[in-house]
């Protein structure tokens, strides 16, 4: 098997922090501030010259959308606690009110930097033949074209609203735009009005191309051009654009009689949540601004004025498919060779040997094929499936409905509490019920976040259980951009474990004596702590001791303290944490041996992996390797149903350790390293050297366990070289 040593950066010397108590709350990084650091990294990719221009624009859009969701959920929750007088500190010692002050400061800086980045990108876009215009730059021909567009495509859905005693201030829904207008008729008559910007119309209106340049006009500019059509006899005096974000978290009555009906009501309630942020364009007239703030019940610290474009999440509309030269080069996910060897038969492929697919590099279509084949196979008698997030036209749900209609026993665990996907999941659950599937909704107090499915197939005189466990959602759209693992096996022990987990979710029968699975909120956290403690024992006894972990978030205090204790015992710990990280690395006497890095790039790192040297170091065939649906967060380990699976197949273990983890640790092209202060510094390859990209490596090299008759000997893996 080909092997190539990879560069592994030495840990920088641990430093001493002034007035730092290693046993105090300051040993933890604040969750919310760590999340903002992550969104800064996302925005920094918009400034990365190695990223194609429109993909950089997409990163601005993603950064904006991320920040919106952060406000509507996390900031909304802190705001509610602060308003209620709650002074209970978080694990890091900050009260809700103090967190809000720090968040406000950092988020404002982030919003301003988004505008700066966009201004730079707009200049580059013009040079590349894409222009975002303002109404004062239109010529007569453009105005004629926009008049027709306005009348035919926009005017019918507009609702201009006067603001006076006869016209109360309207409700402005979450995430909606409005133009606040100060109008004048003659010299004496004034009118205040609102013009909601319809969400049903694209934010950027396409103008006729000129000199080969694709041109777009923001919708608010088009509306301002036609104020006289909406308020005849009035002239525009002053105006500003504003956007509302409301509390979007959902509270469900603990004793809800009908969970589905309760969620349908809660979704309507979400649309009327309290305003948590009001963003408006700079230069707003004082009187009109005061009216809007008063009617929306917001105070000054909840208002952000921006000199630039509001609602940057909509920039995704300008990521044009017709400009492939400004996008990532095309990539077609691979069909595993073993599946091809077995002519597309998933059951034969799995029966041959366990198979681990790495999405999106191996196509998610294999997961869909697994369930579609099960639905059509007369030998399949039962299918069980968890559904946390699904697409609107989900092929997974389609296959389950087909199986149920064909008389197979189908059980679907639909999680109604999947944030922002609740409505879609309710629709899918109704559809499954109509097809004859057994639909259950899990636990009222806990989200079911486990990614697991089983297919029971009659083979001769026995029943064989084929099991799929994953780190991502059963969602074919996000599977094209999220890096996740899909594990297929017909191992009887894992099949028994999975069946017990489904029985627990459908009938509350707590599983006992699980053979290869650990689940939260019961055994998983204990298992993780035991593995960390065992590694510390190896270090104390002079044996090689290493831990590699890859997660989206790591903030569970007890787990972090266990990692600190392991570091102090001499365990070398490498953490690849994409987003939130509460660990404070590189502090003398606390975390000397801990390194934290984050990978942000073309694909969203989403897989959850934990590797323990087990007294042999990493990588090694005797190491302990796990993959999971759970991040190491308090909610995932203590208040959700999650799965942790040990990889025991040697090829699968090698794929996780020597391909996936090794490449993430080796990445230079899109990595940041976290310092003891919680700030991140981008890794820079020495001048003139190759900047290794883990995403490029995965795109160019097949996964070990997906190989077929050709074998795995020629598949590149990376071997670890410690600093």
Image: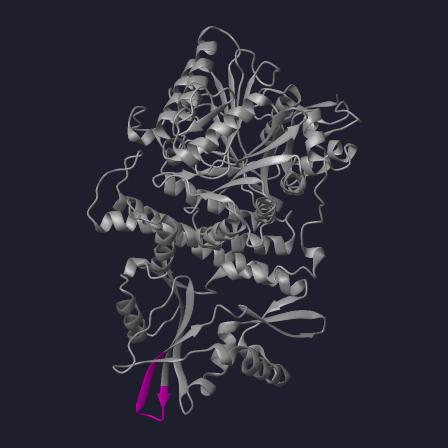
In this view, the residue in front, 193 or 288, is 193
Residue 115, magenta (yes or no): no
Residue 190, magenta (yes or no): yes
Q: Is residue 473 visible?
A: yes
Image location (x, y in percent) of residue 378: 67, 38
Q: Main secondary structure of the magenta part?
A: strand
**Image-based side of 535 in relation to 378, left or right:** left
Image location (x, y in percent) of residue 98: 27, 44
Q: Residue furthest left?
A: 85
* Residue pictured at 55% horizontal, 54% vertical: 392
**Image-based side of 687 in relation to 9, left or right:** right
Q: Is residue 259 above or below residue 232?
A: above
How many discs mark residues in the rendered view? 0
Q: Is residue 602 visible?
A: no
In this view, the residue in front, 353 or 717, is 353
Image location (x, y in percent) of residue 270: 36, 57
Q: Is residue 457 above or below residue 601?
A: above
Q: Quadrant of residue 19?
A: top left
Q: Is residue 319 above or below residue 682?
A: below
For the N terminus, which image quadrant?
A: top right
User: How is the model colour-coded?
Assistant: one colour
Residue stretch in magenta: 184-193
For the C terminus, which image quadrant?
A: top right
Q: Residue furthest top?
A: 541
Q: Quadrant of residue 261?
A: bottom left
Image location (x, y in percent) of residue 301: 29, 57
**Image-based side of 510 in relation to 404, left or right:** left
* Residue pictured at 50% horizontal, 46% vertical: 389
């Amino acid at each position: 098997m080909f092997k190539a040593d990879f560069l592994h950066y030495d840990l920088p010397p641990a430093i001493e922090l002034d007035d730092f108590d290693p046993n105090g709350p300051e040993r933890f990084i604040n969750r919310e501030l760590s999340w903002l650091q992550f969104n800064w990294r996302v925005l920094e990719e918009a400034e990365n010259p190695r990223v194609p221009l429109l993909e950089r624009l997409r990163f601005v859009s993603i950064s904006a959308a991320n920040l919106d969701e952060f406000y509507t959920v996390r900031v909304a929750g802190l705001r509610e606690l602060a308003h209620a007088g709650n002074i209970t500190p978080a694990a890091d010692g900050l009260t809700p009110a103090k967190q809000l002050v720090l968040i406000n400061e950092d988020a404002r800086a982030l919003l301003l930097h988004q505008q700066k980045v966009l201004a730079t990108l707009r200049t580059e876009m013009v040079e590349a033949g894409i222009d975002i215009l303002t109404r004062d730059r239109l010529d007569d021909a453009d105005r004629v074209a926009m008049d027709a567009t306005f009348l035919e495509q926009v005017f019918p859905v507009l609702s201009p609203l006067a603001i006076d005693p006869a016209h109360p201030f309207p409700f402005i829904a979450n995430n909606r735009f409005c133009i606040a207008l100060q109008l004048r008729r003659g010299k004496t008559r004034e009118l205040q009005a609102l013009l909601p910007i319809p969400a049903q119309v694209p934010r950027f209106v396409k103008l006729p191309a000129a000199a080969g340049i694709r041109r777009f006009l923001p919708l608010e500019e088009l509306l301002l051009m036609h104020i006289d059509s909406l308020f005849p006899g009035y002239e525009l005096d002053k105006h500003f654009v504003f956007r509302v974000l409301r509390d979007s978290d959902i509270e469900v009555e603990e004793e809800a009689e009908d969970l589905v009906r309760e969620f349908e009501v809660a979704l309507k309630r979400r649309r009327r949540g309290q305003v948590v942020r009001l963003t408006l364009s700079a230069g707003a007239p004082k009187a009109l601004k005061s009216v809007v703030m008063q009617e929306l019940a917001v105070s000054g610290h909840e208002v952000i004025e921006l000199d630039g474009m509001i609602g940057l999440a909509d920039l995704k509309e300008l990521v044009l498919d017709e400009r492939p030269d400004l996008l990532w080069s095309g990539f077609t996910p691979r069909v595993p060779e073993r599946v091809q060897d077995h002519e597309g038969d998933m059951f034969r492929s799995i029966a041959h040997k366990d198979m681990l697919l790495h999405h999106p590099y191996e196509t998610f279509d294999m997961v869909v094929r697994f369930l579609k084949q099960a639905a059509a196979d007369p030998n399949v008698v039962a299918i069980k499936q968890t559904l946390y997030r699904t697409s609107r036209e989900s092929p997974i749900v389609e296959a389950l409905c087909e199986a149920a209609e064909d008389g197979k026993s189908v059980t679907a665990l639909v999680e109604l509490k999947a944030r922002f996907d609740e409505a879609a999941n309710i629709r899918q659950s109704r559809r499954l019920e109509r097809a004859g599937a057994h639909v259950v909704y899990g636990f009222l107090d806990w989200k079911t976040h486990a990614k697991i499915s089983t297919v029971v197939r009659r083979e001769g005189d026995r029943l064989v259980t084929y099991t799929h466990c994953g780190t991502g959602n059963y969602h074919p759209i996000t599977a094209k951009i999220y890096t996740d693992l899909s594990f297929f096996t017909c191992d009887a022990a894992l099949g028994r474990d999975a069946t017990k987990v489904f029985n627990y979710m459908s009938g509350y029968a707590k599983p006992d004596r699980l053979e290869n699975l650990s689940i939260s909120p019961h055994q998983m956290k204990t298992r993780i702590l035991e593995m960390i403690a065992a590694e510390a024992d190896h270090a104390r006894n002079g044996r090689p001791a290493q831990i590699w972990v890859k997660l989206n978030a790591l903030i569970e205090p007890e787990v972090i303290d266990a990692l600190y204790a392991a570091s102090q015992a001499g365990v070398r710990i490498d953490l690849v944490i994409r987003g939130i990280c509460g660990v404070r690395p590189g502090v003398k006497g606390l975390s000397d041996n801990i390194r934290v890095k984050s990978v942000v790039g073309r694909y969203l790192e989403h897989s959850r992996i934990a590797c323990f040297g087990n007294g042999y170091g990493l990588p090694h065939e005797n190491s302990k390797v796990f993959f999971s649906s759970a991040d190491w967060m308090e909610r995932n380990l203590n208040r959700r149903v999650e799965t942790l699976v040990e990889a025991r197949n040697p090829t699968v273990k090698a794929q996780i350790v020597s391909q996936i983890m090794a490449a993430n640790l080796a990445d230079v092209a899109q990595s940041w390293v976290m310092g003891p202060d919680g700030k991140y510094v981008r890794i820079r390859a020495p001048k003139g050297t190759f900047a290794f990209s883990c995403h490029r490596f995965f795109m160019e090299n097949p996964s070990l366990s997906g190989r077929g008759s050709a074998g795995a000997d020629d598949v590149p893996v990376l071997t670890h070289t410690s600093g």
